[in-house]
Amino acid sequence: MAKEIIEVKNLKVHYPIRSGFWNRITDYVRAVDDISITINEGETYGLIGESGSGKSTTGKAIVGVEPVTSGSIMYKGVDITKSKSRHRLNYNKDVQMIFQDSLSSLNPRKRIEDIIAEPIRNFENLTTDQERDRVQELLDIVGMPSDSIYKYPHEFSGGQRQRIGVARAVATNPRLVVADEPTSALDLSVQAQVLNFMKHIQQQYNIAYLFISHDLGVVKHMSENLAIMHRGRLVEIGSREDIYQHPMHIYTKRLLSAIPQVDVEHRDEHKKHRQEVEQEFQNDQSKWYDKDGRVFPLKHVSDNHLVALPEKEIIEEETNDKEGA
Amino acid sequence: MEKQSDLLLDIQHLHTAYRLNGKFYDAADDINLTLKRNEILSIVGESGCGKSTIASSIIGLYDHKNTKVTGDILYNELNLVGLNESLFDKIRGNKIGMIFQDPLASLNPLMRVGDQVAETLYYHTDMDEKERHARVIELFNQVGMPKPEETYAMYPFELSGGLRQRVVIAMAVACKPEIIIADEPTTALDVTIQAQILDLLEDIQKQSQSGIILITHDLGVVAETADEVAVMYGGQIVEKADVKTIFEHPLHPYTRSLLNSMPQSEDEEEDLHVIQGTVPSLQNMPRKGDRFAARIPWIPASAHEENPVMHEVEPGHWVRCTCWKTFHFQDEVSGE
């Protein structure tokens, strides 16, 4: 059993909605509403959801840049939702982030050397020569030429910039890297490059990734365990096999059926299947969501396959399955 | 032989060049394409390969000072290249509809969405205000808008991404165009919404018997919707065939590399295929020889043609250059 590195327990991030004459808080936007996940050492954990599902907010909360409403994030047995404990544990060194938009996440007025060295300067005391060696080494890891340290971000292509982002994220030897849609702005062949580098670095340095994406194909390639998020809650957690071969929640099925398949021969059948699932999703809203339209709490189906099933449905589902078999 | 009227658009030897530092560089280089009625033609390629350039050349939306378009784009025996603007205004939006990638950027933020669709009708039809309103509601129904009457009076920011794209589609098909150009229509949308929009486009095409040019970089979308596919690299079409041939018997090294770099289910533990090097910029694009040759250096130069041209390998299946005959991936043993 792999050792866990981060344990998120009942995490909630709510934003107040103010309205009325006194500008009082009238309601909350429940961006992240009671989610719990566990990330193991050296593994890639996939977090999938559509836009607005709260997946990026979860990532930010784990890095510590988003104030948490309630719940806890345990790292080395300490709750790091308070900045004091983050400092004590060197958490900000151990957890890094890769952003979606590589251009806006790199300072346009700094050279690559300074960009990559910034986290090193923050946490380590190196001489100028040592620091330069370290930057060169990092650029080497992501396959960038050594003269790039004198260049500025705009001189690179999107894929190269994203690789610089990866180099910066691993500069402090982190234990966990939160990658928020690292390749969704990239072309297919460039995406392959960045994903390969991320995988190699993971194997070399035993880094855990929280891989946030809406692209189910990429997540399938990258992660062993994954969670599907919808309307601020998790609808299904499981291993890659659980989710892709035996999806149980209607939302997971809908998401999976909507991925375009490169299978020209069967595209009509695929389209029909997709429309059936979509129809079922539209018709059975009340069955899979509570009366406020929220996802039900998760229930164990097997040891590590959790599905947001309604109270009584689980028994019916099982009998249906038996009848089907 | 097909009937003459089935041919909607005939593009021959199209060159579109942009001026950069005083010199013109071809962004679309010798493009030959045809679009038939009831057909979805997909142009696929990575960013910067010139696929959107073709779209803007067809519809005449480019900077006339800094762009040079030569060749022929024949629509009903009318050459769209160099057509004067007042004639073009009668075709654009009326006979040729356009759907852009970012629906928020292509809608006027200060105008009610219903009025924006009605504006197209105002310019191209002689309907009065009541008729236009009725037609917009009809269009909103057609594109699957949940509450057409209420949506009419809304502003773009009040709608979700999927609904905004439906408004743009309603606008594009308002005058029942014969040709619809969709430039990355689903790139900004979630997968589930993407599926709905693509279904909608197919439905509209079936109803109106129009031809659609679908520009995308997503091979999955191509496989799901297209009839004919043109793969582009560096401003040129490198392979052209029906969708089945492209995905089942791709020949050009670029098509094969691209298909290979998709994250696929079978090889989860393996590395993804990476195409060596990068796409050269417009100014640095080699104008002689095979443009893809630099990305596959292990293939000897003798395998490439000196001036690669399109060859019809099988009826309807065109491939540029002859290097595909000896091409193999680096980790593969040579085919010979």
Image (tube, rainbow, N blue to C red):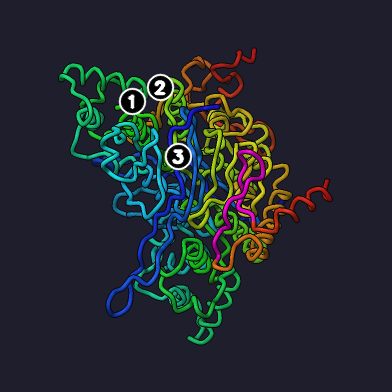
Secondary element at tag 2? helix
What label sits on residue B289 in the rendered view?
Answer: none
Q: Where is residue B159 in the image (x, y as percent from the top left)?
A: 45, 68
Instruction: Please provide the residue range marked out in magenta.
Output: A293-309
Chain identity of mark 1 = A
* Same subunit, tags 3 and 2: yes
Residue at (44% x, 34% y) in the render: A209
Does residue A164 appear left or right of residue B193 in this picture? left
Q: Pointer 2: what residue? A: A205
| Residue B28 appears in the rendering | no
Q: Position of residue B148 (x, y in %)?
A: 54, 76
Look at the image and tell me in which quarter the C terminus of chain A lies: top right
Q: Pointer 3: what residue? A: A7
How many residues crowd mark 2 within 10 Å: few (<14), some (14–19), many (20+)?
few
Does residue B19 appear left or right of residue B55 in this picture? left
Q: Would you say residue A307 sits in the magenta stretch? A: yes
Q: Pointer 1: what residue? A: A173
Residue at (49% x, 75% y) in the render: B151
Is B207 rendered above or below residue A156? below
Q: Position of residue B71 (x, y in %)?
A: 46, 47
Is B129 rendered above or below residue B267? below
Residue at the far front: name it.
A77
Label 1 to label 2: alpha-carbon separation: 8 Å
